């Protein structure tokens, strides 16, 4: 029998309290091609030109992403995954609520 009691593999793969690294690698394998296609389409349409005109802002965003990725990786060794995963899941939810409330 593969997976959980109902035979689904999602029960054991995505929801298991095991090591988070394989799930992160799977997420990257799914999101990377999506991001590359989106970047190619936006570049072709000329929509990425705004990044060049706002280079300072773009650099701050890139630096924040790198710092966040490094800190997130370091936190895996400090906090237990049962605490860290809900906290990291809460960040995009809070961001979405803040964006929805914006005028």
Image (cartoon, rainbow, N blue to C red):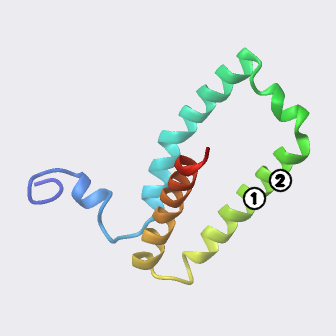
Instruction: Say the numbered circle drawn on residue 51.
Output: none
Could you say which quadrant of the image residue 37 lies in? top right
Tell me the SS state at disc 1: helix
Q: Residue at x 48, y 71 (%)?
A: 87
Which quadrant of the rendered structure holds the N terminus? bottom left
Tell me the SS state at disc 2: helix
Could you say which quadrant of the image residue 20 lies in? bottom left
Q: Could you say which is closer to the camera, residue 56 or residue 71?
A: 56
Which quadrant of the rendered structure holds the C terminus? top right
2 and 1 marks in contact (CB < 8 Å): yes
Judge whether 36 appears above or below 55 on screen. Answer: above
In the displayed structure image, the side of residue 10 where residue 43 appears, left or right? right
Instruction: Say the numbered circle drawn on residue 64.
Output: 1
Residue 98 location (% of width, % of height): 56, 55
Q: Residue at x 88, y 38 (%)?
A: 54
Residue projecting furthest to the front: 103
Residue 16 location (% of width, % of height): 29, 66
Q: Residue at x 77, y 27 (%)?
A: 48
Residue placed under numbered mark 2 in the picture: 60
Judge whether 70 appears above or below 62 on screen. Answer: below
In the displayed structure image, the side of residue 48 where residue 76 appears, left or right? left
């Amino acid at each position: 029998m593969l997976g959980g009691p109902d035979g689904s593999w999602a029960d054991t793969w995505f929801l298991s309290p095991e090591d988070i690294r394989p799930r992160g690698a799977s997420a990257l394998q799914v999101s990377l091609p999506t991001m590359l296609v989106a970047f190619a389409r936006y570049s072709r349409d000329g929509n990425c030109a705004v990044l060049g005109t706002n280079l300072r802002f773009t650099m701050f965003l890139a630096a924040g992403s790198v710092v966040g990725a490094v800190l997130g990786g370091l936190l895996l060794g400090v906090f237990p995954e049962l605490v860290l995963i809900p906290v990291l899941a809460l960040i995009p939810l809070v961001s979405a609520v803040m964006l929805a409330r914006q005028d």
